[in-house]
């Protein structure tokens, strides 16, 4: 049967339904387990093999040796495509994906992340101003 | 006899190719290298005589001294015949196949733009895929081409920058 | 003097219309969103849009006819506001009235459409011009049915004055039931007048960007938008006055409530219409209007002619 | 009567990838169309020659975000064929599941876009709302909503757990119900049918001649589907129907796509039931031996083609990509002829150029075209066309034939 | 006239109309922008409308690396927009060129052509990330810090945002006693 207003019932039902909208940003949205967000660098585990640098499709990681068995990682968040290939490539699990996706910045230079080698604690993450 | 072997046999018998020229890579994949003089004849036979009615695409390759063109023809049963032919890089002249496949025009334009092939008989039309104003004689897919060759040549006049 | 100035500017004049128009735009958008199962804009959204646009830079394209370009939004706004004064709202009395004001109102309501056309035409951008021609084409299609549909009740009432019409229907409320076809026709025509789906052909952004208003920005765009909002209110009020003349004799307070309910109902119906339908092509729209809507309106006219002969010898 | 030209693009609501069409109009009727492609040309093929296979894989995935899995799988199939890798069956199944999920997401997306192009935003809202279910599933399986990054040379990067499979079945039930509803809407809503049927007509012969692929071709009765004709991944093991249609117009393309959606659900159910246990990767060498391979893949939009030539290093010698839209774009000009301006967006969108979802049209031409004809003329013309068609004379065909003859 | 200025700023924040421009993206970012408009994310909550013409728009949302061919157009569209205007770069490509950096026909990020007000990395940027970026841009326009949470009627435990130690973005425009329900659902 061809008729106008076929969707009438559907729209009226949804009027009385709860909207399908999520309340982000008022309510945080949880990412799935496998989500690939910002990459975290665990400086204590890195051995400096630079396999991650070799495989990164955008060359946005720079691992530099800053001392004896101490390495510093620099990420260009504005260039990373969050593919987590570096995580797969790293033989020592010194890199991991986090669920952090709220990365927007108003200045581009704030998108450079430097994970310092020192002091040793794992989340020595601090964006430079 | 499998399909691929049938294709191989037919081509061998009809055109007297040597067995090295034809390679059955796997199920449904046949590669054939044809000298340029013979190409049109083989191509026409493949299309009209062997029912390869669909042109998947044309790949252009830069092999150093020659440019190679691979015409990928497909048949409804899934078999794909890749016909390769070579022309010297110095005078890369091809004859169009757009009379057989009007849809192939766009692939030929691509060859002309990216590899600098001269396709004879190709109807006038917009270039593809390079932008208007792209400098003549620059063909990105040639191995000796470097992106630096564009510097200062294209784009010609920069719009005033805000950044 | 001071009173009528108050009437003109504040209530039920311009300011009231402004607020009411914005409120109805909100109702429309919110309803549209909710029918699509999403949250939709907050209540102040139309107002924020208006203020923002008003405070924005307005660019007049070089090729455009700058006088016409500036004048048209004001024209559109003025005509719809004027039309409003002739419509009886919550009593049988409108602000101004004379015998024949029905015709004037209908004409006044045509002016905004014409200004859209002129605005589009004088922007001299390709898309605005296509939008403008489509506006005009469409106008011819829905205007005649609208005329007929609205004249039919007048015929039955035997007067060309809106106020007298409402008086008539107030006395014989049952007669309003005869006008049901006219009500449907005029709802459809109003949807066309407001250029909304399925008749948003002149503004179809997937085809011709912003249509008539492609080149407009800032203040002038704000003015057009508010004019359209007010046009919706005025159109709804007209339909309410002509086809739903109920509750007018109950005094100002109740009358006002009834009036709000009626206008809301019309706006809600229009919102529903645009939710469930796809945009027509211009020629489909014209065919639809001439093949179905116009005959229906004509039919209504005939019925009322016969009825007025039978009922009011 | 003056014809006038209207520029569409490079940014246009019906285009996602920037391309520019110039349409010559007579009144509202399209006389001719001229295409200018390549705004989106980024030079990916060249860049593939300069990057290692693993890097190129991510690059190829980003040829197109909507059919990202198609491109990356197609590329990887070719690479794996050259390297002679035997991919574990479980990995093949996982790739197939993702491929079909991608088709679902893409077709639902298309349905919404088609709705939007004809001013039916409610359809856009509903189908995209339901599409979010697929996106959630994809995100749960692969870690990202788009550009899944599930492939790696030699298999897949992430395994699918039992819970995931159970969830998949549930998702399929939800989606199947919704799709049935959309089929109902598509076959019953009058404004929709009016806007879709008879629009963008292209004959069977033209379709074959111009080399159209995918749903565009299948809606003109071309029974061609790589999944069946040239099976890859796990398509050999499962049963499905190739949906064809003979409407030859936009309506037919809609029916083919919704029909394919229903097939996808049954395919995923079969895949979930049959998925074998085992590893999901084999070790792949970094350097791929010299050789060449030609790989075909039925992307949501049709046949996707990759040709890879390896030279024994860790970088490819040549990567050739032929996206389905390129094959289809050439039939667009034919579809346009004698349709109306109002139909341009839906015709372009109907080949699903994967650039159809977003809204951006920018005025780029300032020259004004004056037109004089009036409504009566327009109505008359439409009317006469209709009348002649009823009498058995189809101007659509006639004009096309005339033009062809003139060209010849 | 300070209140007028305040009103205008308020209106600007509450009514950012966007225009979307693809400068050579892979479409993924584009479909995520559209997804942000559809029921699941519904950015009309923030007053965002998608417009077809630059004349009507306040925010230019760009996705994709700037190809050599599209650069002029981008600049032209930017110039067609009336002041005040903002540019948001959506996706890694738009921020820096991303995975296409180094391709011969790619000039780099959006800021290679026009100034950018906010960068949203991600490949593609999720709809949530896009909302987050837009919200960050809009809050920055207020100049001052977001309104103190003290005048919110909620108590610690009830406020979904404050409970996590972040500032309340107060985009719903409601003051006092707001709740997730009130923030949009009612
Ligand atoms: S980890 Fe292996 S590849 Fe890396 S530097 Fe050490 S030996 Fe070399
Ligand atoms: S996630 Fe991908 S792009 Fe980002 S640093 Fe790792 S490998 Fe590079
Ligand atoms: S791959 Fe891992 S261990 Fe090697 S340099 Fe990178 S982070 Fe360090
Ligand atoms: S043309 Fe379409 S299918 Fe092809 S890569 Fe682009 S978006 Fe994807
Ligand atoms: S950032 Fe990623 S998803 Fe977005 S356009 Fe670029 S490649 Fe595509
Ligand atoms: S949620 Fe509302 S009331 Fe509470 S602090 Fe924020 S703005 Fe104020
Ligand atoms: S819960 Fe909210 S309102 Fe209460 S103190 Fe924290 S931020 Fe303020
Ligand atoms: S808007 Fe949300 S976060 Fe802000 S005060 Fe209200 S409930 Fe709390």
Image (cartoon, rainbow, N blue to C red):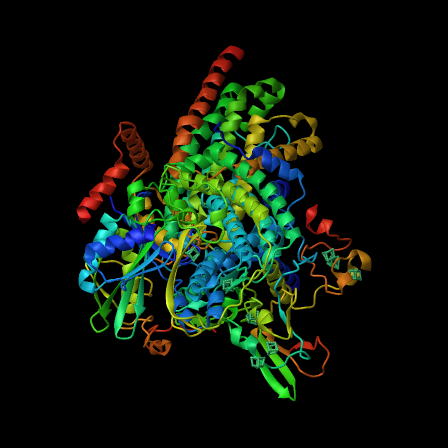
Q: Position of residue D91 (x, y in %)?
A: 54, 57
Q: Quadrant of the N terminus of chain C?
A: top right
Task: Residue C288: give x, y in percent of width and height.
Answer: 42, 31
Given residues D355 and D231, the one toward you in this image is D231
Instruction: Please say whether residue D407 is visible from this viewpoint.
Output: yes
In the rendered structure, the answer to whether residue E65 lies left or right of residue B63 reads right
Residue C24 figure quarter? top right
Residue C26 in view of the camera:
no
Which residue is farthest bottom? A68
Which residue shows up at 59% across the image and 75% down it? A75
Q: Quadrant of ligand 8?
A: bottom right
- Residue drawn at x 56%, y 24% is C165
Outermost residue, front side: B1
Toward the viewer: D208 or D135?
Answer: D208
Give the camera-side residue of A37 and C186.
A37
Exactly how many numbered labels are in the figure? Answer: 0
Q: Is residue D296 above or below residue C81?
A: below
Q: Position of residue A2 (x, y in %)?
A: 47, 29
Tell me residue B76's x, y (percent). Answer: 34, 47
Q: Foreground residue, B18 or D20?
A: B18
């Amino acid at each position: 049967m061809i008729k106008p207003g076929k969707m009438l019932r559907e729209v009226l039902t949804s009027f009385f339904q709860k909207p399908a909208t999520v309340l982000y940003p008022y309510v945080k949205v949880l990412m799935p387990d496998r989500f690939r967000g910002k990459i975290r660098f665990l400086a204590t585990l890195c051995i400096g093999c630079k396999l991650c640098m070799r495989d990164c499709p955008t060359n946005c990681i720079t691992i530099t040796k800053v001392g004896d068995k101490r390495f510093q990682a620099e990420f260009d968040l504005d260039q990373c495509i969050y593919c987590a290939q570096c995580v797969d490539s790293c033989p020592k699990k010194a890199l991991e994906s986090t669920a952090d996706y709220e990365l927007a910045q108003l200045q581009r230079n704030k998108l450079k992340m430097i994970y310092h080698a020192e002091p040793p604690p794992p989340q020595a993450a601090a964006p430079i101003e | 006899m499998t399909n691929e072997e049938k294709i191989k046999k037919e081509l061998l018998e009809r055109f007297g190719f040597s067995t090295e020229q034809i390679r059955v890579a796997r199920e449904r994949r046949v590669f054939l290298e044809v000298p340029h003089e013979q190409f049109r004849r083989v191509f026409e036979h493949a299309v009209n005589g062997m029912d390869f009615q669909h042109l998947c695409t044309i790949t252009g390759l830069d092999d150093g001294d020659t440019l190679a063109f691979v015409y990928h023809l497909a048949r409804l049963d899934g078999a794909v015949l890749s016909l390769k032919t070579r022309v010297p890089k110095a005078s890369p002249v091809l004859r169009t196949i757009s009379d057989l496949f009007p849809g192939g025009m766009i692939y030929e334009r691509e060859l002309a733009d990216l590899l600098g092939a001269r396709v004879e008989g190709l109807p006038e039309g917009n270039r593809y895929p390079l932008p208007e104003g792209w400098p003549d004689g620059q063909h990105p897919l040639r191995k000796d081409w470097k992106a630096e060759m564009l510097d200062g040549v294209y784009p010609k006049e920069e719009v005033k920058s805000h950044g | 003097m001071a009173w009528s100035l108050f009437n003109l500017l504040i209530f039920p004049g311009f300011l009231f219309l402004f607020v009411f128009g914005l409120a109805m735009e909100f109702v429309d958008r919110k309803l549209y969103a909710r029918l699509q199962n999403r949250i939709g804009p907050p209540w102040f959204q139309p107002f924020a849009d208006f203020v923002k646009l008003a405070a924005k830079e307005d660019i007049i394209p070089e090729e455009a006819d700058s006088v016409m370009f500036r004048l048209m939004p004001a024209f559109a706004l003025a005509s719809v506001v004027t039309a409003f004064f002739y419509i009886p709202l919550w009593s049988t009395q409108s602000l101004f009235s004379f015998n024949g004001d029905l015709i004037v109102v209908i004409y006044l309501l045509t002016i905004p459409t014409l200004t859209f056309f002129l605005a589009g035409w004088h922007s001299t951008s390709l898309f605005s011009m296509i939008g403008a021609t489509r506006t005009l084409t469409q106008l011819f299609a829905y205007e005649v049915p609208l005329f007929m549909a609205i004249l039919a009740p007048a015929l039955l009432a035997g007067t060309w004055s809106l106020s007298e019409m409402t008086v008539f229907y107030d006395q014989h409320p049952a007669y309003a039931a005869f006008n049901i076809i006219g009500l449907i026709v005029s709802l459809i025509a109003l949807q066309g007048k407001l250029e909304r789906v399925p008749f948003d052909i002149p503004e179809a952004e997937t085809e011709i960007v912003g249509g008539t208003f492609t080149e407009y920005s800032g203040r002038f765009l704000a003015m057009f938008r508010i004019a359209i909002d007010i046009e919706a209110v005025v159109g709804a009020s007209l339909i309410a006055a002509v086809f739903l003349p109920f509750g007018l004799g109950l005094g100002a307070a109740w009358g006002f409530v009834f009036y709000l309910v009626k206008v809301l109902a019309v706006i809600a119906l229009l919102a529903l219409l645009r939710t469930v339908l796809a945009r027509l092509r211009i020629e489909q729209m014209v065919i639809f209007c001439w093949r179905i809507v116009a005959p229906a309106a004509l039919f209504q006219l005939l019925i009322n002619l016969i009825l007025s002969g039978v009922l009011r010898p | 009567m003056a014809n006038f030209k209207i520029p569409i693009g490079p940014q246009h609501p019906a285009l996602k990838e920037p391309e520019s069409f110039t349409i010559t109009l007579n009144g509202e009727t399209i006389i001719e169309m001229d295409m200018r492609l390549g705004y989106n040309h980024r030079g990916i093929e060249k860049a593939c020659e300069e990057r290692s296979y693993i890097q190129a894989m991510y690059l190829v995935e980003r040829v197109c975000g909507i059919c990202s899995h198609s491109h990356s799988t197609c590329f990887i199939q070719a690479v794996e064929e050259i390297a002679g890798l035997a991919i574990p069956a479980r990995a093949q199944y996982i790739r197939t599941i993702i491929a079909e999920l991608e088709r679902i997401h893409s077709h639902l997306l298309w349905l919404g876009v088609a709705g939007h192009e004809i001013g039916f935003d409610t359809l856009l809202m509903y189908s995209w709302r339901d599409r979010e279910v697929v996106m959630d599933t994809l995100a749960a399986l692969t870690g990202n909503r788009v550009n899944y990054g599930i492939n790696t040379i030699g298999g897949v990067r992430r395994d699918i757990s039992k819970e995931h499979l159970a969830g998949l079945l549930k998702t399929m039930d939800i989606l199947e119900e919704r799709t049935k509803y959309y089929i109902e809407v598509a076959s019953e809503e009058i404004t929709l049918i009016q806007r879709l049927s008879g629009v963008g007509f292209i004959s069977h012969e033209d379709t074959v001649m111009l080399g159209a692929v995918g749903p565009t071709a299948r809606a003109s009765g071309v029974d061609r589907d790589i999944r069946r004709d040239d099976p890859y991944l796990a398509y050999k093991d499962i049963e499905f129907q190739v949906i064809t249609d003979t409407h030859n117009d936009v309506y037919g393309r809609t029916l083919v796509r919704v029909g394919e959606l229903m097939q996808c659900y049954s395919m995923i159910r079969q895949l979930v039931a049959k998925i074998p246990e085992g590893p999901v990767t084999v070790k792949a060498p970094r350097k791929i031996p010299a050789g060449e391979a030609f790989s075909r893949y039925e992307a949501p939009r049709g046949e996707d083609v990759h040709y890879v030539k390896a030279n024994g290093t860790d970088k490819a010698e040549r990567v050739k990509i032929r996206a389905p839209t390129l094959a289809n774009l050439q039939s667009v000009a034919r579809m346009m002829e004698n349709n109306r301006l109002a139909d341009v967006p839906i015709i372009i969108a109907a080949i699903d150029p994967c650039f159809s979802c977003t809204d951006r049209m920018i005025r780029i031409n300032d020259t004004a075209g004056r037109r004089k004809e009036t409504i009566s003329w327009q109505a008359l013309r439409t009317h006469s066309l209709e009348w002649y068609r009823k009498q058995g004379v189809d101007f659509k065909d006639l004009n096309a034939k005339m033009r062809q003859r003139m060209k010849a | 006239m300070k209140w007028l200025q305040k009103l205008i700023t308020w209106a600007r924040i509450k009514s950012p109309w966007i225009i979307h421009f693809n400068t050579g993206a892979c479409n993924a970012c584009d479909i995520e922008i559209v997804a942000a408009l559809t029921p699941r994310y519904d950015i009309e909550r923030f007053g965002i409308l998608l417009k077809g013409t630059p004349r009507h728009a306040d925010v230019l949302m760009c996705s994709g690396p700037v190809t050599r061919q599209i650069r002029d157009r981008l600049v032209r569209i930017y110039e067609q927009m009336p002041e005040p205007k903002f540019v948001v770069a959506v996706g890694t490509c738009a921020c820096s060129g991303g995975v296409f950096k180094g391709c011969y026909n790619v000039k780099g990020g959006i800021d290679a052509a026009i100034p950018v007000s906010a960068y949203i990395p991600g490949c593609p940027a999720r709809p949530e990330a896009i909302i987050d970026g837009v919200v960050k841009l809009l809050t920055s326009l207020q100049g001052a810090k977001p309104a103190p949470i003290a005048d919110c009627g909620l108590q610690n435990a009830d406020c979904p945002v404050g409970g996590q130690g972040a500032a309340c973005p107060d985009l719903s425009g409601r003051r006092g006693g707001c709740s997730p329900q009130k923030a949009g659902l009612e």
